[in-house]
Image (tube, coloured by chain):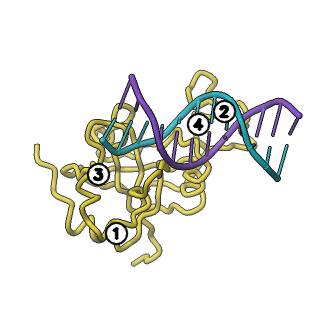
Chain colours: A yellow, B purple, C cyan
Amino acid sequence: MTRCNLRYWLMKSEPADVSIDDLAAFPNQSVAWYGVRNYQARNFMRDQMKINDGVLFYHSNCKTPGIAGIARVASTAYPDATQFQQKNKYFDAKATQEQPRWFNVDVQLVRKIELISLAELRKHTELSRMRTLQPGNRLSITPVDPAEWEYITAKLVRPHQE
DNA sequence: GCCAACGTTGGC
DNA sequence: GCCAACGTTGGC
């Protein structure tokens, strides 16, 4: 059965926090994308993400930022557990079990790739409209056009070499 | 570590 | 509901 309504996303993670290798350490499991505390990014997860949506796993705030792997959405959104944990840095006193404020999906690594650096992405005019490449953009989750996804996966992705 | 850009907060 | 102050993001 073919589903044609899948979407594509770019999701940023600081490798010092959760890196591609952390994700790869759970080859057949999914990891909760907890800790998003931005309403736009939350809404993308809560309202639009579906299982099997494509994900570009992006390393941010590090020496060489860029796309480090391909992943997939592995669950629909559910309340982010960390908002209820008082000692967690993502604790939110205004969130309740009855009215959670923050949601997350689960993400599963599909494959690690040779890093496609931000500098490399900027060289391709086909990608010049990517949301994450726009000046001033800080959103940790952004939609990716199907054409952009196709271009990146067909032309830029290389298998990871050890 | 700097700093520009942006989102959120809270006083009024 | 305005907007200044503040905190965060993230490339460099």
Quarter of the figure with the N terminus of chain A:
bottom left
Marks 2 and 1: in contact by CB < 8 Å? no
In contact (CB < 8 Å): disc 4 and disc 2 = no
Whole-number angstrom distance, CA of label 4 to CA of label 1: 33 Å
Which SS class for mark 4? helix
Residue tagged 2: A92
Q: Earlier in the sequence, mark 4 or mark 3?
A: 4
Q: What distance separates the C-alpha of mark 2 from that of mark 3?
A: 33 Å
Disc 1 versus disc 2: nearer the observer: 1
Instruction: Give the residue drawn at x 39%, y 32%.
Output: A17
The earlier-in-sequence mark between 4 and 2 is 4
Q: Chain of mark 1?
A: A
* Labels 4 and 3 share a subunit: yes
Q: Chain of mark 3?
A: A
Counting residues from the start of the chain, the first of labels 3 and 1 encountered is 3
Label 4: how many Cα within 10 Å (few below 14, some 14–19, many 20+): some
Q: Quadrant of residue A159 in the image?
A: bottom left
Q: Position of residue A50 (x, y in %)?
A: 50, 63
Q: Nearer the viewer, residue A148 or C6?
A: C6
Label 2 marks which chain's residue?
A
Label annotation for residue A46: none
Toward the viewer: A31 or C12?
C12
Count neighbours of disc 3 (C-alpha within 10 A) and say few if under 14, some if 14 to 19, many if 20 or more: some
**Mark whose residue sits in front, 4 or 2:** 2
Q: Which residue lies at the image location 57% right of the left edge and 33% below the top edge?
A: A82
Amino acid type, residue under disc 2 in the picture: Asp
Q: Nearer the viewer, mark 2 or mark 3?
A: 3
Q: Are marks 3 and 1 in contact (CB under 8 Å)?
A: no
Q: Which mark is residue A118?
A: 3
Tag 4 residue: A81
